Amino acid sequence: MSFEAWTIFALFWVVFVTTPGPNAVNCITNGMSLGFWPAMVGVLAILTQATLFLMLSALGITALIAASPAGFLIAKLIGAGFLIYLGVRGWILAKKPLRVDVRPARSVYLRALAIATINPKSVAGYLAAFSQFVQPGVPIWEQMAVILPTALTLTALSYTGFTALGAGIGRAALGAVVNIWVRRVMAACFVVYGVLLGGTSLPGRA
């Protein structure tokens, strides 16, 4: 991959991982309820998903999944239901005083991994990356040696920032009335993402 191609890819990925979505909302929520360092387990889960999707994209599996209308529809509906569930649950729990959560790291990790995996933005982003930036005449694994560390570094920086933002909000709003609305906004975002996910059209259809 040339330096020019790498620069274009890096700029694309910065926009991709800094645009707020379910992952960002989850990182902010984790930061608010867990504190910064415990919430970083969620960032680790996102990096796990990113590594997996990058490898699958390199092998063409992600493109195959997106090309299957039935498989895409099932994954879309499951993902929509999960996000809406998280949003409704978060809205209901917003009235309870915010406290430092003691959820096991495994629970934080698995929830973040599930949110990252069902996120349609992920599939679209990885397909875009591989359709636009991978050069057909160059061995794929030579390009992956550049793409993988670049993507993972930018992903880690972005979601660490969202986690730090949530931790800051949590400290500033702990026990305050405004905290209820901050948490409800985060919960509403999950519901909106779920509804949008459930309503997106299938690939190749209007």
Image (cartoon, rainbow, N blue to C red):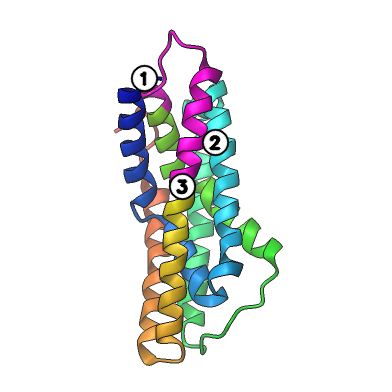
* Residue 205 relative to residue 32: left or right: left
Q: Nearer the viewer, residue 39 or 206?
A: 39
Q: Would you place residue 206 above or below residue 114 in this image?
A: above
Distance between mark 2 and mark 3 Cα atoms: 13 Å
- Please report whichever mark, 2 or 3, sits nearer to the chain's N-terminal start: 2
Q: Tag 2: residue type? A: Phe
The span picked out in magenta is: 130-154
Residue 9 drawn at (x, y percent): 35, 31
- Please report whichever mark, 1 or 2, sits nearer to the chain's N-terminal start: 1
Pointer 2: what residue? Answer: 53
Pointer 1: what residue? Answer: 2
Residue 195 drawn at (x, y percent): 39, 56
Answer few, some or many: residues within 10 Å of disc 2's Cα (few below 14, many 20 plus, some between 14 and 19). many
Residue 172 drawn at (x, y percent): 40, 84
Do the residues under discs 3 and 1 have CB atoms within 8 angstroms? no
Q: Would you place residue 82 above or below residue 198 in this image?
A: below
Residue 155: mark in rendering: 3
**Residue that appears at 36% across and 19% down:** 2
Q: Main secondary structure of the magenta part?
A: helix
Q: Tag 1: residue type? A: Ser
Answer few, some or many: residues within 10 Å of disc 1's Cα (few below 14, many 20 plus, some between 14 and 19). few
Q: Tag 3: residue type? A: Thr
- Please report whichever mark, 3 or 1, sits nearer to the chain's N-terminal start: 1
Q: Is residue 147 visible?
A: yes
Q: Would you place residue 181 above or below residue 52 in this image?
A: below
